[in-house]
Image (cartoon, helix red, strand yellow):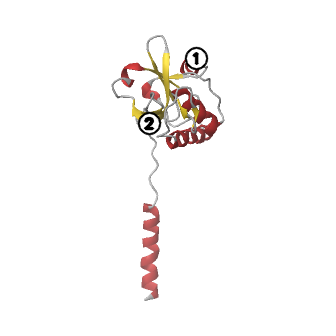
Amino acid sequence: MRSAFRSTLIPLAIILTACGHAPRRNEPPSRHEPVPASTQAAHLANAVLFRALALVGTPYRYGGNTPESGFDCSGLVGYVFRDAAGISLPRTSAAIAAAPSPRVDADDLRAGDLVLFGDRRTITHVGIYVGQRRFVHAPNSGGTVRIDSLDTRGWRETFRHGQRVIR
């Protein structure tokens, strides 16, 4: 009986072990959400995302740049990048847009990239891209830090470009 059990158990274990591994896919990453180039960049981007998402619900305050005082858009972005990734950014949206970071089209955004909004001449708003065409930002007086879609009317028309700070 033991021999029959063993002769059944060993092949079953081999089959189950073989089925437990997913086949490797040689497909490139999705065009809409490429993977950061390095493990270090991926870790920093994740840290930025988790920190930004943890601040959802924090009150808006013009000139604010801490969770205790509230945030305006550039204050939120600056705080998150400094706190989560040790990266200092300029204080205003326009100055962030002028910083020497690569620009990124909407279809090539990665989680952790900055998204910038404005009119044809001036950048007036900034947020942090979280994926699936959504971003975290501090939108306006009386509001709170929240997640919005790039496809929402208003944001779609004023989106100018993304910027890749984490590379």
Mark 1 lies on a secondary structure that is: helix
Which circle, 2 or 1, is nearer the viewer? 2
Question: Which residue type does callout 2 highlight?
Answer: Arg
Q: Which residue is located at x 46 percent, y 58 percent?
A: 21
Farthest top residue in view: 121
Frontmost residue, 83 versus 2? 83
| Quadrant holding the C terminus | top right
Q: Which residue is mark 2?
A: 146
Q: Assign a secondary structure to mark 2.
A: strand
Please say if 138 is above or below 118: below
* Residue 113 appears in the figure: yes
Residue at the limit of the structure toward the left, as seen here: 153
Residue at 46% x, 23% y: name it.
Answer: 105
Q: Nearer the viewer, residue 141 or 131?
A: 141
In the rendered image, which quarter is residue 82 located in? top right
Q: Residue furthest bottom?
A: 1
Residue that appears at 51% across and 40% down: 55
Q: Quadrant of the N terminus?
A: bottom left
| Image x and y of residue 43, in percent | 59, 42
Q: Which residue is mark 1?
A: 98
Give the amino acid type for the residue marked by disc 1 in the picture.
Ala
Q: Earlier in the sequence, mark 2 or mark 1?
A: 1
Q: Residues within 10 Å of mark 1 (few under 14, many from 20)?
A: few
Does residue 102 sit above or below 55 in this rendering?
A: above
Residue 157 spot, x, y in % from top left: 37, 20
**Residue 133 visible in the picture:** no
Q: Nearer the viewer, residue 7 or 29?
A: 29
Give the Cα separation between the discs numbered 2 and 1. 25 Å
